[in-house]
Amino acid sequence: MKKYVWVIALLLVVISGCSLFRDQVYMPKPPLMTYVPAENGQSDFWMSYYEITNWQYRDYLSDLLWMGDTPAYHRAYPDTSLINQQLWIGRRYDYFQHPMFDNFPVVGLTTAQMENYAVWLGDWYRDKYKGAWEMEIRLPTEYEWRTAAQAANKLEEPYVHGKHYANSKGCYLMWFYTPEDRMLLGTDSQRTDGYYLPDTLSYSFENEWYKASVHTKNFTKEKERTFRKGMPYAGMPVHVYSFFPNDYAFYQLTGNVAERVLNADGSENTMGGSFRTSAAYCKVADELPYPYDATVPQIDVGFRLVCRYEKVQTKEAVKRKKQNWKRKRGD
């Protein structure tokens, strides 16, 4: 008799386990995004690991051309004349198109261009999941940006990694306009406003970099060495995954390029400082306001995106919605 009791109990456990598995919440991870848990009564969300890169944005432009929407393609194209004029590396290479800079942040965009990219990516996600998810892809709000930057346990600290922008060995933890850059770039070391203007750049620095990177027998290998190991990046952005990520696994929320945020009330802000601002502009709290005109494209302003799921669903619900989506599309 005891034997049958154990068998029945085991069957009940298996049946109840299958029911739980069938009804469990299923939330797919958006590509290249990491999860930020809810705080202070706010809902949780996902955010891009790093700033949107040149190759990601070029993929968007290629899709517009593939769809035959040439006017949208031209409206979406970055202001490369600004980039080539003000970003010193742009005078030697096409910063936006050259594969050397695939994993560098895209710059030279308006807020509207950033928002249009977010709309396109949201449509791509919905198509990928066959319409099963009601999601929102957009620019982060200032609150979301700060939540991701502070990573829950750094709420009282000024910088992403704590009290300081350098570690105990003096190594910088983010990419900003350092005193060493002032000397290297030949800019006025007596400036006290904490940022440099592109027209103050020493051409001797640019010429020396160019000779070191081009006048070699094998430019491909030298290119790799130059941009990932040896030569300085001073006066330009760096790879989006440079330096250590914070506790939520976000790269360079401060420094490198400043990031556009768009609040629910329609107000805009530019957060985190950049490669041409001092560390004082790269704080998470009590930071100095972005020193340039953020209403127009800039060579040191990029963006990352937020994904919020508008409705939590079970696996069975997702399966049914996928089937309905396929029927509507005639797949």
Image (tube, rainbow, N blue to C red):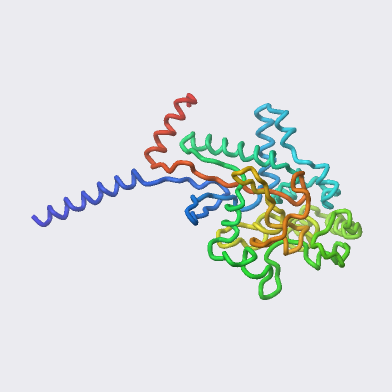
Q: In terms of depth relative to the viewer, which is nearer, 179 or 260?
A: 260
Residue for point 63% across, 57% down: 251
Q: Would residue 152 be found to the left or right of residue 72 on screen?
A: left
Which residue in the rendered view is the most extreme toward the front?
265
Name the quarter where the N terminus is drawn: bottom left
Residue for point 72% across, 47% down: 106
Which residue in the rendered view is the most extreme toward the right?
204
Q: Is residue 245 above or below residue 7?
A: below
Which residue in the rendered view is the most extreme toward the bottom?
168
Total marks drawn?
A: 0
**Picture coordinates of residue 67, whole percent (x, y):** 65, 28
**Picture coordinates of residue 92, whole percent (x, y):** 85, 49
Q: Is residue 275 above or below residue 95?
A: below
Which residue in the rendered view is the most extreme toward the left?
1
Q: Would residue 241 be found to the left or right of residue 77 on screen?
A: left
**Picture coordinates of residue 256, whole percent (x, y):** 72, 57
Q: In terms of depth relative to the viewer, which is nearer, 104 or 156?
A: 156
Q: In terms of depth relative to the viewer, which is nearer, 168 or 96?
A: 168
Residue 198 placement: quadrant = bottom right
Residue 179 placement: quadrant = bottom right
**Picture coordinates of residue 276, whole percent (x, y):** 78, 58
